[in-house]
Structures are given as C-alpha cells and as structure tokens.
Image (spheres, helix red, strand yellow):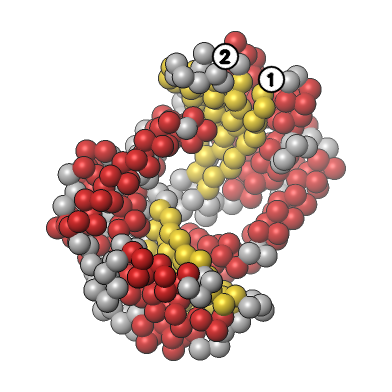
C-alpha cells in the first residue's frame, strides 16, 4: 500500500491487487453530520446531482455511457460522515475512470432543471424508506438513541429543506466542502501510473474547509421504549439499541467479537434462541456500527406484536450470558470476524471503501491492525464492554396488526 499527498492537499492511497479490474473511489469528508439545520439533506442531494451533468457532458446519459460502454460500473453513497463516488473498470480503462470522476467533481453543471427533477427523486427515496419497515426501523432507532449527536438526523435530510433547495444553495455547499484537501482517493488494482493520472486530472486548488466541533453525546442513564403504530403491516419490527463508541476506540474490537457470538448467520445466539428454538421471528440478527464519531450496537427482530416483551427479555438475557462464554465460543467468534472480513476483502470496491474509511478514522495503516486486535480480544474484554455499554437501552417498535 502506498499513500501520497499532492501539493493541493489531495490524498491518494494505492493498493495493488492483481487482476483485470481497477477501482477508483473518491471520498469527500462531508456527510449529514456536517450539515447545519437549514442544510439537512444537501450532502445526499449532491451525491445525486453530480452525476446529472458536467460542462463537458451535460446529461446523465453522456456521463453514464462513458463508463457503461466499456463494461464498467459506477455508483455513489452518502453516510453521516462521508460522501463517496466510485468507478470500477478494466484496468486498461483506468484513465477513463479517473477522468470521469475528476470531471463530475470539478466541472458540475448544476442545471436548474436537473435540480428540480432530482428533488422529486430524493423525496421519492425518502418515501420509500418510510414505507419499508426494515429500513425505517434504523432511522427510528438513531433518532431516539442519540440526544445531541447529529447522527440522530437521517442522511436523506429534511423534506422541507429538499423542497426549497436552490441552485445557489447547492453550489455554495459544494464550494464549501468539495476541496482537494477535504478529499481522499483510493485506487485498488494493478496499475502503475496512478499518481501521474490523478495529478493530471484533479487540478482543483486547495481551499479552506470549515471545521465544526462534534457535540458530546450524553451517556445513557435510563431505558426508553418508542412505539410507532403501523396499520398496514402484519409483523411488528423491533430494534433494541445501545450507544457504544466510535471506531477509533479500542473497545470496538471487543464489540465486533461480541457481534460474532450473538449475530453471525444462523449459528448466532440470537438466531438460535429467538428463531430456531422458539420460532418467535423470521428475521433476527445483530449489528455493530462504529463510525468516525459515533457507534451503536443493536439487535433486531420482526415478530408478532404479542411477543414484544418476551423477545426483549430474551435479547437482554442472551447478552448477559456472554459473560460466561467458553473459550471455544470466543475462538469461533474471532474466526468468524476474520473470515467474513477477509472474504469481503476479495472485492476491490470493498477494499477501496475500507482504505478510505480507516484513513478518515485516523490513518489508513490502522486497517492492517484490525485482525491483529480482533485476535487479542479476551473474555475479560467482553465482560467489560457489556458492563460498560449495555446498562441502558433504547427499544424502538414499529407495531403491526
């Protein structure tokens, strides 16, 4: 792995990976956590509108066809902490991937008609999330789990803000955050001219990027239950969530192993007890989420409404039982984390994602230490994180018929 910083502040990370493909991914270190109340949703909106046209290629078709006519793939996503754009092509077309990404990030058209059209698309996307309980349950959890942290607000933003967006507002936000010194590019593939190619195309000048403080999230001091009624669904969707710590904290490794014991596939303890043994749910699992500035652990299950209290009780009991896990339980969980991680790393785009993620957390070199620290997690570490982070919970319920 090689890392360089260009004169304009743009960071490039290259990971050589033998094969026919190359992935080029650009991370802009701005997401919904960085938005002011009157800006909520602009980060996500920019992810959409940047593919709609440039001064050189003024339509979405002209941009997409440049990649798709050579068999390539491209996409983008927005999170609380970052906005990412990637292109995957055959390595002989590496220059085209860099060219297109540089073009959309440096020469956006921001045509008024595109902005008006994209408003409707984003609003439909928001409707889709709210219509689908398995998506919306996570929005409901973060809204109620966090009290001061901006991650309580959904990435898609505020409907009123989206409806009232103007070209001037979008352009101002773009100019404020889309600077080379606020970007990192990861390149995964067997290419040799990566630094020259990026330097040639990414010629934007360094700018001052505003830095805002991240409010301190209060420690949970009580349990809470949030129930939202839904008339048109048969199942009741439940998520039991706990505030934890950001990815840079050493406890995240123990939380990963805990997730491996409780939530791995069909052999995780939650699946076995709630579905296999008792038949109380079809969909059940766990999630450990740790980002740059926040983290949470959650257990989810889609159940019959009458079993709500019972399922919550089982979840809390299964977590408590981990304090008495065996050496075999611990080793299996560590092996699970290792296996799932390394299998993910067979995919060039996921490698590109991880390179950018760890660089934003602190330093891309931390990526190499991930599995080493997983292997060092002990039973004492598991007991400590359970006693520290699982005292109080937030229980969100989308109540069905």
Q: In this view, does 383 lie above or below 320?
A: below
Question: Does label 2 or label 1 sit earlier along the sequence?
Answer: 1
Is 271 situated left or right of 363 in this image? Answer: right
401 or 367, which is in the foreground? 401
Pick whichever, 69 or 171, lies toward us. 69
The disc placed on residue 280 is: 1
Mark 1 falls on what kind of element?
loop
Residue 47 x/y as whole percent: 35, 57
**Quarter residue 355 falls in:** bottom right
Decide which of 65, 397 is in the foreground and name it.
65
Q: Residue 367: name its quadrant.
A: bottom right
Image x and y of residue 338, in percent = 73, 56
Residue at the (66%, 59%) spot, across then down: 344
- Where residue 197 appears, x then y in whole percent? 43, 86
Q: Please give the residue where the numbered disc 2 appears in the rendered image.
A: 305
Residue positioned 56% across, 20% down in the render: 235
- Residue at 42% of width from left, 64% of height from top? 85
User: Would residue 365 appear left or right of 259 to someone viewing this image?
Assistant: left
Tell me what residue is drawn at x 70 percent, y 30 percent: 270
Indicate whether 348 appears above or below 200.
Answer: above
Q: How many labels does the image show?
A: 2
What SS does tag 2 mark?
A: helix
The circle drawn on residue 60 is: none
Q: Distance between the residues labelled 2 and 1?
A: 10 Å
- In which quadrant of the rendered image does the N terminus lie? bottom right
């Amino acid at each position: 792995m090689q890392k360089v910083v260009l004169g304009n502040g743009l960071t490039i990370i290259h990971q050589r990976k033998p094969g026919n493909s190359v992935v080029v991914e650009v991370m802009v270190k701005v997401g919904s956590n960085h938005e002011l109340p009157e800006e909520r949703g602009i980060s996500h909106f920019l992810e959409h509108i940047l593919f709609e046209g440039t001064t050189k290629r003024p339509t979405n078709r002209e941009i997409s066809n440049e990649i798709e006519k050579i068999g390539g793939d491209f996409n983008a996503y927005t999170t609380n902490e970052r906005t990412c754009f990637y292109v995957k092509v055959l390595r002989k077309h590496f220059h085209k991937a860099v060219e297109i990404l540089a073009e959309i990030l440096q020469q956006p058209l921001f045509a008024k008609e595109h902005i008006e059209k994209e408003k409707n698309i984003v609003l439909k996307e928001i409707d889709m999330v709210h219509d689908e309980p398995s998506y919306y349950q996570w929005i409901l959890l973060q809204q109620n789990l966090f009290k001061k942290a901006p991650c309580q607000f959904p990435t898609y933003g505020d409907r009123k803000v989206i409806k009232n967006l103007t070209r001037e507002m979008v352009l101002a936000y773009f100019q404020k955050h889309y600077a080379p010194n606020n970007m990192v590019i990861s390149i995964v593939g067997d290419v040799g001219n990566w630094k020259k190619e990026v330097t040639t195309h990414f010629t934007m000048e360094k700018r001052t990027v505003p830095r805002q403080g991240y409010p301190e999230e209060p420690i949970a001091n009580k349990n809470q239950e949030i129930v939202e009624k839904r008339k048109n669904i048969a199942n009741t969707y439940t998520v039991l969530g706990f505030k934890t710590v950001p990815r840079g904290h050493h406890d995240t490794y123990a939380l990963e192993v805990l997730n491996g014991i409780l939530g791995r596939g069909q052999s995780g303890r939650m699946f076995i007890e709630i579905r296999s043994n008792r038949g109380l749910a079809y969909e059940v699992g766990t999630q450990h989420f740790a980002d740059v500035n926040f983290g949470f652990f959650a257990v989810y299950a889609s159940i019959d409404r009458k079993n709500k209290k019972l399922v919550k009780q089982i979840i809390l009991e299964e977590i408590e039982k981990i304090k008495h896990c065996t050496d075999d339980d611990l080793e299996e969980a560590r092996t699970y984390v290792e296996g799932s991680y390394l299998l993910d790393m067979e995919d060039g785009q996921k490698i590109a994602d991880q390179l950018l993620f760890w660089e934003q957390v602190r330093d891309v070199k931390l990526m190499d230490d991930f599995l080493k620290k997983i292997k060092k997690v002990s039973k004492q570490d598991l007991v400590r994180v359970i006693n520290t982070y699982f005292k109080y919970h937030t229980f969100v319920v989308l109540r069905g018929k």
